[in-house]
Image: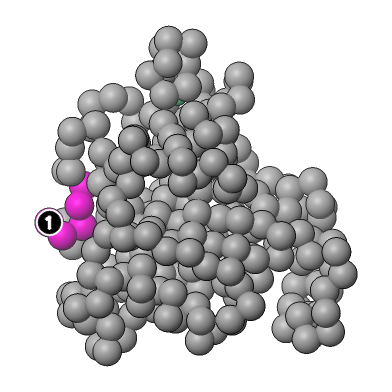
Amino acid sequence: MALPPSRLERFARHIVIPEMGGAGQAALAEKYVVMIGLGGIGSPALQYLAAAGVGRLTLIDDGAVELSNLQRQTIYTERDIGHGKAVAARRWLANFDDTLEVTISDARVTSGNAVGIFASADLVLDGTDTFATRLAVSDACVASRVPLLSAAVGRFQGQVGAFRGHLPDEACYRCFVGDAFDAEDCDSCAEDGMLGATAGWVGTLAALQAIKCLIEGVGSLDGPQWGHVQLLDGLAPSLRSFAISKDPACRGCGSAG
Ligand SMILES: [Zn+2]
């Protein structure tokens, strides 16, 4: 579908990239991404996905903006404190580009409700901060046959994994971390602390990987290295990539699942 002149101008710096072109940009306008977790990772990821012209977004977070969030959650301001993050994120988005279609939810994503939410998505981007939620999201992505970018961050380190566990030979997030963490909230940044810019780095890499997912096969960009996890280290800055093998016994995506 052809983009109107105002959109061609807005995305001109994308369109001149040979690997994206007008076709890639038009494809982004047709895509639908579900974002779970509108915190330190979700904030910059949302900004770059919206800036890239991803046409439709669902924003999910059950939290409210707190003063201590502003150190890393870059879409919020002091005015948003006390307001739901999903509502505040929608407000940011409406100011930024009101042609993008957005729905919001302040429900906590569980294995029970996620499959219904994900059903028609092109991609799920998970930036939540607990293993239990990330595993529930992963299982629901496998069940919904929707690709998943799972992003997480610690004090100075982060990771972004790209999974299509619904495919026969590809791993899911559960193949990567196993079952031990289903009941755990052990990696919450509330306890560990986090340098805000680390979350920004992880969130923007997640957005870059998301864009590659969304236009794979349209432009000539390679995909996001499906089945790989990118490990980011901010202390001695480096990026490492490793492949995850499908676990045949995985409860999420294996033959026993
Ligand atoms: Zn699996």
The correct choice, above or below, for 40 with respect to 232 in the image is: below
Give x and y (percent) for residue 33: 56, 55
Q: Give the camera-side residue of 215 and 91.
A: 91
Q: Regarding ligand 1, which quadrant of the image does it lie in?
A: top left
Image quadrant where residue 202 sits: bottom left
In-image side of 159 versus 218 (left or right): left
Q: Position of residue 193 (x, y in %)?
A: 18, 62
Identify which residue is drawn at 42% across, 50% down: 126
Rendered image quadrant of residue 134 = top left
Residue at 62%, 41% in the rendered image: 225
Q: Please, is residue 132 above or below residue 40 in the view?
A: above
Q: Residue at x 41, y 31 (%)?
A: 139
Q: Position of residue 164 (x, y in %)?
A: 57, 33
Q: What is the quadrant of residue 184 in the picture?
A: top left
Q: Position of residue 53 (x, y in %)?
A: 66, 71
Describe the element under mark 1 as helix, strand or loop: helix
User: Between 143 and 44, which is closer to the camera in this rendering?
Assistant: 143
Of the pair 119 and 9, the residue shown nearer to us: 119
- Neighbours of disc 1 within 10 Å: few (<14), some (14-19), many (20+): few
| Residue position for label 1 | 191
Q: Is residue 152 magenta?
A: no
Q: Residue furthest left?
A: 191
Q: Which residues are magenta?
A: 187-191
Q: Nearer the viewer, residue 205 or 65?
A: 65
Magenta stretch, main secondary structure class: helix
